[in-house]
C-alpha cells in the first residue's frame, strides 16, 4: 500500500516553476502510489469548468493519465478552487471528497480536511465561506456570465490579500479547541489537513489519549508529499527550482 497526499499547490500559469514541479511529480513519484489524495487549493482559483484554458486542460490530462492507469484520484475543495464542477471531475476521473471525511489507513480511521474550517478565529472568512459555498449561491454563480465571474474572482483575490495583511497569524491558523472538537466528533487520533501553509506534525491532547495533527505544506520553494504505507505516515519535501 502506498497512498500519497498533497495540497495547496495553487497551480496557475503565473507560477511555471510549480507547474513544472507538479508535472515531474506526476511522471516520477505519483506512479509509485496506489491512490492520490489532493486536499484542496490545487488551483490558485477556479472560475468555472467552462472557463478552462489550455493550461487547465494540460493539468487535467495529467490527472486523467493517472486515473487511466487504474488508480483512484481523490479531490477535495479548497478555499480557492471550491467551484470545481462535475465536468472537471469527469474529464480527469477524479472522485470528489467531502470536507471533512475519513479514510482507513493501516486499520486506523483518519480524518481528512482542507483545514479552513479549523480556523474558527477568522470569523469574517467563515461567514464568507458559508455564503459562497451555499449550493444556491454557487449554482447562480455558475449560471452567471463568464465575464462577471472573472471580475468577481479578481475582486475576491484582491480583497483576500488586503484582509490577510490586517490579520494576525494566530487568527489565520487553526484553533486548537476546534481541532480537538472535530477529532473527538469523528473519533479519530490522526487528522491530515492543509490550508495554513505551515507544514508540521502536532501532538493533540484528546480525552482518549494523545492524537496527531499532520499539516501538509504548500508548494512554493518546496513541494510537500505525505506518504502512507505499511511503515506509517511519512512527510517529505523537495526543492522546486525557480524559473
Image (cartoon, grey):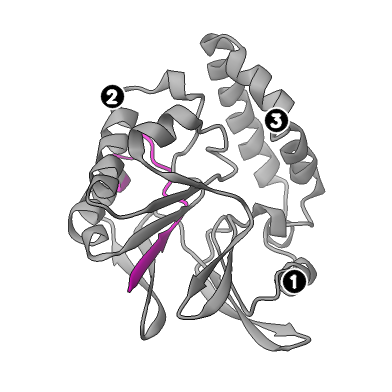
Location of residue 150 in the rendering, given as x and y in whole percent from the top left corner? 53, 18
Location of residue 23 in the rendering, given as x and y in whole percent from the top left corner? 23, 47
Is 43 placed left or right of 205 in the picture?
Answer: left
Image quadrant holding the C terminus, namely top left
Which is more toward the observer, 79 or 18?
79
Task: Determine whether 132 is above or below 27 in the image.
Answer: above
Q: CA distance from mark 3 to mark 2?
A: 28 Å
- For mark 3, give the secondary structure: helix
Residue 109 belongs to magenta span: no
- Quickly name the residue at label 3: 135
Q: What range is drawn magenta here?
A: 1-18
Is 62 placed left or right of 155 in the picture?
Answer: left
Question: Image point 72% across, 40% down: which residue?
Answer: 129
Farthest residue toward the left? 28
Location of residue 189 in the rendering, given as x and y in whole percent from the top left corner? 63, 80
- Quickly name the residue at label 1: 176
Residue 54 numbered mark, or none: 2
Q: Earlier in the sequence, mark 1 or mark 2?
A: 2
Question: Image point 70% across, 32% down: which residue?
Answer: 132
Amino acid at each position: 500500500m502506498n497512498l500519497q497526499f498533497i495540497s495547496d499547490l495553487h497551480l496557475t500559469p503565473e507560477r511555471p516553476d510549480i507547474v513544472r514541479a507538479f508535472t515531474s511529480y506526476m511522471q516520477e513519484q505519483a506512479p509509485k502510489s496506489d491512490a492520490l489524495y489532493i486536499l484542496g487549493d490545487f488551483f490558485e482559483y477556479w472560475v468555472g469548468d467552462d472557463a478552462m484554458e489550455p493550461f487547465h486542460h494540460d493539468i487535467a490530462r495529467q490527472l486523467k493519465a493517472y486515473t487511466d492507469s487504474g488508480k483512484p484520484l481523490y479531490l477535495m475543495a479548497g478555499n480557492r478552487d471550491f467551484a470545481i464542477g462535475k465536468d472537471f471531475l469527469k474529464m480527469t476521473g477524479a472522485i470528489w471528497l467531502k470536507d471533512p471525511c475519513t479514510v482507513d489507513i493501516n486499520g486506523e480511521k483518519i480524518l481528512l480536511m482542507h483545514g479552513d474550517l479549523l480556523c474558527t478565529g477568522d470569523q469574517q472568512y467563515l461567514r464568507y465561506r458559508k455564503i459562497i459555498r451555499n449550493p444556491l449561491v454557487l449554482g447562480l454563480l455558475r449560471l452567471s456570465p463568464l465575464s462577471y465571474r472573472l471580475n468577481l474572482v479578481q475582486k475576491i483575490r484582491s480583497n483576500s490579500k488586503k484582509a490577510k495583511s490586517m490579520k494576525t497569524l494566530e487568527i489565520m491558523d487553526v484553533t486548537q479547541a476546534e481541532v480537538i472538537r472535530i477529532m473527538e466528533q469523528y473519533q479519530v487520533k490522526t487528522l491530515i489537513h492543509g490550508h495554513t501553509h505551515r507544514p508540521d506534525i502536532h501532538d493533540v491532547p484528546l480525552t482518549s489519549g494523545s492524537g496527531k495533527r499532520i499539516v501538509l505544506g504548500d508548494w512554493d520553494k518546496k513541494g510537500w508529499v505525505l506518504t502512507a504505507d505499511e511503515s506509517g505516515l511519512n512527510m517529505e519535501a523537495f526543492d522546486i527550482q525557480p524559473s
